[in-house]
Image: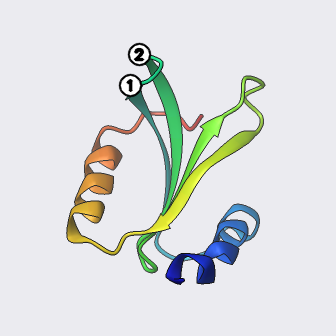
Amino acid sequence: MDRSLRLHWIRFHLEEHAAGDVEIFSVEERDQKKRQDIVRTYIYDRDQQYIIVLDPQRSQRDYYLVTAYHLNKDYGEKKIKKLFKNRLPELH
């Protein structure tokens, strides 16, 4: 039920560019199914503890929405901070 209450947050973060403590960064990760490296873009709202994960399309102009969720566990924020440390120098 909590997740459905936050669905509108995705659009807000994508279109309104939420002000405040929001980090947008790209990371190269390993796709276990495809067995290849992929680039993912994250939008992390520190105030709301909310993360949106996007995959860039081949055109490099648009994105696919992978997932979006609220970080309700301590280890979730720790994982995002680790990803942020390993971010790419440019946004994809």
Q: Position of residue 55 (x, y in %)?
A: 61, 37
- 32 left or right of 91 in image: left
Q: At 54% from the left edge and 76% from the top edge, which residue is drawn?
A: 3
The residue labelled by disc 1 is 32
Q: Which class describes the residues within 10 Å of circle 1: few (<14), some (14-19), or many (20+)?
A: few
- Determine which of the numbered discs, if any, sits on residue 78 in the image: none
Q: Position of residue 87 (x, y in %)?
A: 38, 39
Q: At 60% from the left edge and 75% from the top edge, which residue is drawn?
A: 19
Above-or-below relation of 6 to 67: below
Q: Position of residue 74 (x, y in %)?
A: 22, 70
Q: At 70% from the left edge and 76% from the top edge, which residue is drawn?
A: 8
Cβ atoms under marks 2 and 1 closer than 8 Å: yes
Three-letter residue code for mark 1: Gln
Quadrant in which the N terminus is drawn: bottom right
Three-letter residue code for mark 2: Arg
- Determine which of the numbered discs, if any, sits on residue 35 in the image: 2
Q: Choose top left, top right, bottom left or bottom right for residue 9.
A: bottom right
Quadrant in which the C terminus is drawn: top right
Q: Which class describes the residues within 10 Å of circle 2: few (<14), some (14-19), or many (20+)?
A: few
Looking at the rendered structure, the number of numbered marks drawn on it comes to 2
Q: At 41% from the left edge and 74% from the top edge, which residue is drawn?
A: 49
